[in-house]
Amino acid sequence: MGMIDLSRILRPYPVRPPASGISRRRSLWERLHLDPWLLGMLLALMAAGLMVLYSASGQRIEPVIAQAIRFGVALVVMFLLAQLSPSTLLRWALPVYALGVLLLVAVELVGDVGMGAKRWLVIPGVIRFQPSEMMKLAMPLMVAAYLSRRALPPTLRDIAVCGLLVGLPVALIAKQPDLGTSLLVASAAIFVVLLAGLSWRFIAALAALAAAALPLLWMNLHNYQRQRVLTFLDPNSDPLGSGWNIIQSTTAIGSGGVFGKGWLQGTQSQLEFLPERHTDFIVAVLGEEFGLVGMLAILALYLAIISRGLWLAAGAQETFGRLVAGSIILTFFIYVFVNVGMVSGILPVVGVPLPLVSYGGTSSVTLMAGFGILMAIHAHRRLLPR
């Protein structure tokens, strides 16, 4: 009583040996360590994303081709990670975490500045990437690796150690500044700890402590971050300035009605009233052109992906695998919830892209890498006797 029981949240289900009459196609998926249902839904989401991106980018084919190439790279990364065993992931958790922290330090020292933030490392002529994206996977792997070697539920000492593991990279990311990514990285670790089995009393105490720390957090926010919160509370206080983004976004979504204006027919997006329409605010393009029906369809697809991911996570029969798999899919849910929430005006704008729909390379690769790890954990489960 009073505990979050990991066995109830992600209960391992018995895995039967495959029947002798199993189809050759199913056997092929098993040999590839891929889940065809999850992969099919992810490909459908990517296809929908490319279609919306074409409209959001002003009907230019170049961004669509670039995004398709990134999706191809992301699928290759997913496939490669799906071949790894949970024991291999466990061994590599600490080195990957340490490398991620070192790269974040490198960003602080020699990072490339863009749009007022120092978030990127550049290898001239080769690649430009955000090391903070790497921590979205390194963090849950590291925290799960630590907790899986200890008796659960975690003790106060274990939670303190996890806090130290989380605090350093999150502080480095927040300093770039990148509040959205820092919150996602912290969320990935928090989900691992919650799934490890915390008492509700302890959760309530942590929530009260976090609430008490809000004034301190407010004092350490950048001016533009404070303005985002104030704009969220009253967008019309500065309709031509800080409130412009959210006002145009909600106008676009509302004008789509039930069935939308039609693909490529959105006025807010095509006439460039809507800012960042191919990245953070791409869901507003979707709402304007495809209406409530389109919004519900894409949300239903996300829900199906999350449901399938939780089902796969439930099949993990070791603590490390369950913690990592559960954290990955719940963090994916946070991506969707925060992006749709901020674009529709129920959350402050924090710069979180819509997964596999918004334009962006590093984020897409990170997300598909996470699904690769999820499939790896599912594919390497032990077969139980009847």
Image (cartoon, rainbow, N blue to C red):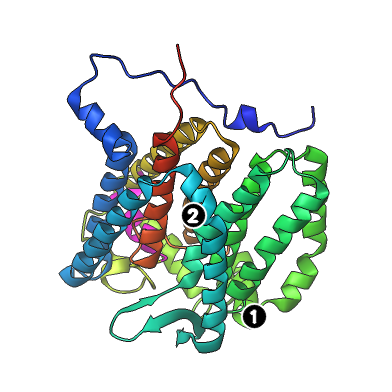
Q: Which residue is mark 2?
A: 335
Left or right: 330, with 40 as reference point: right
Mark 1 crowd level (few <14, some 14–19, many ≥20, 10 Å Cα):
few
- Disc on the earlier residue, 1 or 2: 1
> Which amino acid, mark 1?
His
Q: Closest to the observer: 50 or 38?
A: 38
Visible residue check, residue 263? yes
| Residue 54 sits in quarter | bottom left
Q: Residue at 75% of width from left, 77% of height from top? A: 219
**Vertical comparison of 361 with 38: above or below:** below
Q: Residue at 67% of width from left, 40% of height from top? A: 196
Instruction: Determine which of the numbered discs, if any, sits on residue 312 in the image.
Output: none
Q: Secondary structure at mark 2?
A: helix
Left or right: 67, with 107 as reference point: left
Image coordinates of residue 308 in percent, x first then y, are: 41, 35
Mark 2 crowd level (few <14, some 14–19, many ≥20, 10 Å Cα):
many
**Vertical comparison of 50 with 232: above or below:** above
User: Could you tell me if the residues under marks 1 and 2 are in contact, i.e. CB atoms within 8 Å?
Assistant: no
Q: Which residues are magenta?
A: 280-292
Q: Closest to the observer: 161 or 384?
A: 384
